[in-house]
Image: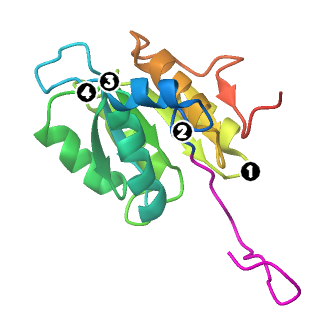
Amino acid sequence: MPRGPKYKAPSGPRFKFLAPGVGLGPESIQSIMTRTMPDEKNDGAATVLVVEDDFDLRDALVPILEYEGHRVVSAANGREALDRLHAMPRPSLILLDLMMPVMSGEEFRAEQLRDPALASIPVVVVSAHPSAEEQAARIGAAAVLKKPFDVDELLEQVRRSSRGSAGAALVPGGIATGPRRQ
């Protein structure tokens, strides 16, 4: 990128996604690159439904989760997510944005809870909304990831929430609120 007196940095919201292995030595990168991906018959792989209206974010989350060995199905709004849930095997986890067109995250969650076959699927709210924690608690989400978030936090929350926590409600410490402080 050109730098100098005429260069002006772009402004606006930014998300920083770093793939595992960035900044590591050649041996570590080679190890990551040669890691085998689980196949469709791997019963240990969690299926994650990503419900996010922002195409760029949804498009970035899918390969990150797939790279970690998860099966991923995505939907652009709550209505599309319900349609997918009725047409697919039960996912292990739902990553849910709150503010979406057609059907919001809260409306989706209300419909999900009305269906006994879907009610126990844990939900992690992924939102930049200032009251995301309160909304997540109100709808019985397992956790909250505040946008922008760190990829490692996302992956840890997916591991934690998809591991037998069906029906879990939001508990203290279940909230990840943006970039980790070190």
**What is the spatial separation of the Cα atoms under label 1 and label 4, in whole angstroms?**
37 Å
- For badge 1, the amino acid type reads Pro
Farthest residue toward the front?
A: 26
Res. 102 visible in picture? yes
Pick whichever of labels 1 and 3 is earlier in the sequence: 3
Question: In the rendering, at what x and y percent does residue 132 appear?
Answer: 66, 43
- For badge 3, the amino acid type reads Arg
Disc 3 target residue = 35
- For badge 4, the amino acid type reads Met
Left or right of 40? Residue 169 is: right
Question: In the rendering, at what x and y percent does residue 112 appear?
Answer: 33, 36
Farthest residue toward the right?
A: 5
**What is the spatial separation of the Cα atoms under label 1 and label 3, in whole angstroms?**
39 Å
The residue sitting at 59% across, 31% down in the picture is 24
**Magenta segment includes 11:** yes
Please tell me in which quadrant of the rendered image residue 59 appears.
bottom left
In the image, residue 52 sits, relative to residue 144, either above or below, namely: below
Disc 4 target residue = 37
Q: Any mark on residue 130, and which?
A: 1
Farthest residue toward the top?
A: 164
Q: Image quadrant for the C terminus?
A: top right
Confirm or deny contact between disc 3 and disc 4 (CB under 8 A): yes
Disc 2 target residue = 125
Provide the major secondary structure of the magenta segment: loop
- Look at discs 1 and 4 and give the one toward the viewer: 4
- For badge 2, the amino acid type reads Val
Question: In the rendering, at what x and y percent does residue 22 appear?
Answer: 57, 38
The residue sitting at 71% across, 18% down in the picture is 173
Structure colour scheme: rainbow
Please tell me in which quadrant of the rendered image residue 73 appears.
top left
**What secondary structure is marked by label 4?**
loop
